[in-house]
Amino acid sequence: MEETAAIRTRKLSKVFGTRKAVDKVSIEVPQGAFLSIFGPNGAGKTTLLRMLSTLTRPTDGSASLMGIDLREDPEAARGRIGLISHNAMLYPDLTAEQNLLLYAKLYGLADPQARVMELLEAVELKHRRLDVVRTFSRGMTQRLSIARALIHDPDVVFLDEPYSGLDPHAVDIFDQLIEKQREGRTFVMVSHDLRKGFDMCTHALVLARGRVVTFGAKDQLDFDEFSELYRSTVGMGVS
Amino acid sequence: MARKQSTGADRARAGQVALSVPSTFAQYKTLLAKDLQQEFRTKEMLTSMGIYALLVLIVYGAALGQTAQATDVLQLSGGLLWALIVFTSLLGLNRSFNHEKEQGCMEGILLVPMDRSVIFLAKATSNLLFLLVVEVIAVPLFWFFFLTTAQPGPGFMLMAVPLAVGTVGMAGIGTLLSTITVNTRGKDVMLAVLFVPLIFPLLYACASPTTAVVVGAEGYLDVFTQSMALAGGYDVIMLLVSWVLYDFVISA
């Protein structure tokens, strides 16, 4: 039996006023894949990610996540989604533990306290669990954000420019944490860093003006070929 | 309300976390507890509303110091008290979504599989509680400064009823409107522009019985009963409208 695609879109579009932010995007991402989405500013990367994570309603077309239609049953899809963005989505005046417990209870975890402790240990923040998030460095906040996104063990994790504001050391720690969580999960990452995005991905999607320029598995492509393709099609320099 | 959530059986990966479908009430309690925890840690809303209420009382003191008759103060008391409550509420409601906006927290909450009206109920409840706390401090102060020298009517304790009914309505409508205005430019002014006209019927329906019970003139109970029926009806309608519209508003 054919495995359900982690993400499938058909002519997915989003229009803001008269501007087409995403224009008839059709992609299929298998389970366990790591999709990197590239494109210049205003290409529609974040809008696409927001539609896939149910935060923005599409204007037209269809999308499904793990076989669940996002338009018909967004609530069911939300239980399978984790989102890590440059916004940590953590309450700065609550402690690390309170933040994770909040989400654990909202998602209906059977044993919220145990799961929170497990994740705090995984992101190496157990010793700071009683400190308010406002006192955390950017790197620590982003590590806690990983714990928040994974609290309900989602099947698909979206990463929206997760490296912004991180120093190189924090980037390394972040990468290691993501690497540990990759098994069996599907990741979709929006990134301006072509090198990093390409190294991490199994599939690549390039968008320009809301449209798909290139989409596919990266098996047959090395980075030089890909960056040349990106430069020639999108017409931008490589970061 | 029936909700769907995928559980272990239909999920692809092994070694998953045990999930159950939390009740709507459990999610409501969790969100409300979050708001209370935050406020008790920062005291941001309570402090700003409390200080503002105190300052308004000082201004009232200067203004009412010129009145010769104590009965004049009684006649004005309902209106003055409600003006104090409305402007203090505006200040608090403007801040009620500040924490949600910071670090994109509202998006984190929106990603949780739950009925969005639960978010409305929890936020409206926390706003109501904070407004009531401020009223518990401000109303006795108002009484102490302006009404101790006058002779209020025998049923003056009934003023707690319009205060409670009015505050429920203001918290509900205010929560909906502050959700609408939180991402607008000039949100402070925008909230006031939308809030005051919308709560005007409620304000009118609550100010007149407040004055009636304080003055205690003949037939004050009739005024009180009619006005409270109007205010109660307004609360029910507006809270239902807010509840129904909230999913659309917060998703927009």
Image (cartoon, rainbow, N blue to C red):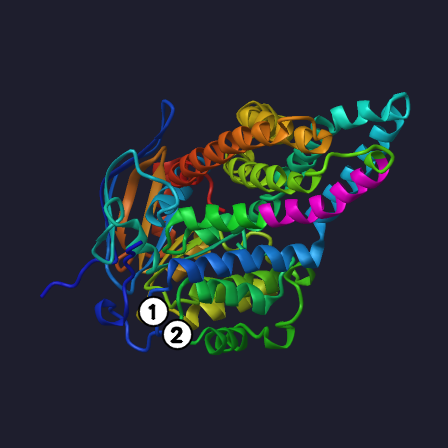
| Residue A192 visible (yes or no) | no
Asked if residue B92 lies in the magenta stretch, the reply is no
Quick check: B96 left or right of A188? Answer: right
Q: Nearer the viewer, residue A223 or A199?
A: A199
Instruction: For the residues labelled 1 and 2, say whether their Cβ atoms are less than 8 Å apart.
Output: yes
Residue matched to label 2: A110
The mark found on residue A184 in the picture is none
Disc 2 residue type?
Answer: Ala
Both marks 1 and 2 on one chain: no
The mark found on residue B20 in the picture is 1
The answer for which chain carries disc 2 is: A
Asked if residue B142 lies in the magenta stretch, the reply is yes
Quick check: B106 left or right of A218? Answer: right
Q: What is the secondary structure assignment of the residue under circle 2?
A: loop
Please state the horizontal and vertical placement of residue A84, each as a whole percent of the image: 47, 56
Q: Nearer the viewer, residue A200 or A162?
A: A162
